[in-house]
Amino acid sequence: MTRQSIQITDELLDYIHTSNPPEHEVLTKCRLETANHVRSNMQISPEQGAFMSFMIRLIDARLAVEVGVFTGYSALATILALQKNAGPGAKLFALDVSHTYLDTAKQYWAEAKVDDLIETRIAPAKDSLQALIDEGYKGKIDFIFIDADKKGYLDYLPLGKILLRNGGLMLFDNVLRNGLVVDENTQDEAALAMRELKLLASADDGLEVCMLGIGDGILMARKLK
Ligand code: DHB
Ligand code: MG
């Protein structure tokens, strides 16, 4: 036991990767090709993908929602883990506001032969989440990954909570906002939203919350009732 997390060097990261299950070849391709993208920092790390897959397996998730798809790495990691749990019964609703990167994402999903298990919906995520509620998915979703417009997280929390089954898990990406959440003088709207999200989630007695200091911070919220 140590009081603080250690600094993860590149060498340690390689060591961590060798302990995790091998990354699917299409995930590797997606990650390497997205590395050249101007917005490559929006992609999750392979160790975050491994962690999310582990959690999806742990809770035996079959039905999931992702908000914010980018070039499709996290969605692919998610559906591959869901598929291990549920075979052809696995399903991911992949929500985004635009087609900009979705066409790229879809190519990877097709290459990995899981495109038939992913339903994309192009609309403001608030509307898509409400539509899922209206379509009868209330209390039916096992796993939700939120990785989109940061101010929107404050809407996605209550809508996601309605969709989650008891014991279901919702993960929010970038909750440390590159450290800005503890900058007293920050005017960064996303950082302010992340602070508010943390307060809202922590104060909700229907949720159990745990924040992880990996990547850019992940807030995990498990639905209790
Ligand atoms: C940004 C968004 C992300 O989801 C991320 O992982 C990194 C950066 C951004 O909007 O800058
Ligand atoms: Mg992110």
Image (cartoon, rainbow, N blue to C red):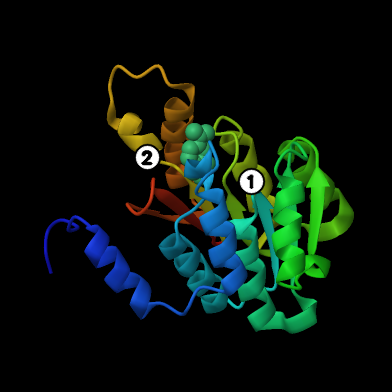
Does label 1 point to a residue whose CB lies under 8 Å from ligand 1?
yes
Q: Nearer the viewer, mark 1 or mark 2?
A: 1
Residue 13 screen position, x and y as percent:
30, 64
Residue located 12% across and 58% down the image: 3
Q: Is residue 106 left or right of residue 173?
A: right
Quarter holding residue 124: top right
- Eyeballing the image, is 175 above or below 94? above
Query: Does the rendering let one see residue 157?
Result: yes
Residue located 55% across and 77% down the image: 57
Q: Is residue 83 left or right of residue 172?
A: right
Residue located 35% across and 79% down the image: 19
Quarter holding residue 114: bottom right
Q: Which mark is residue 212?
A: none
Give neighbour class at mark 2: few <14, some 14-19, many 20+ (Cα, 10 Å).
many
Type of residue at label 2? Leu
Give neighbour class at mark 1: few <14, some 14-19, many 20+ (Cα, 10 Å).
many
Quarter holding residue 16: bottom left
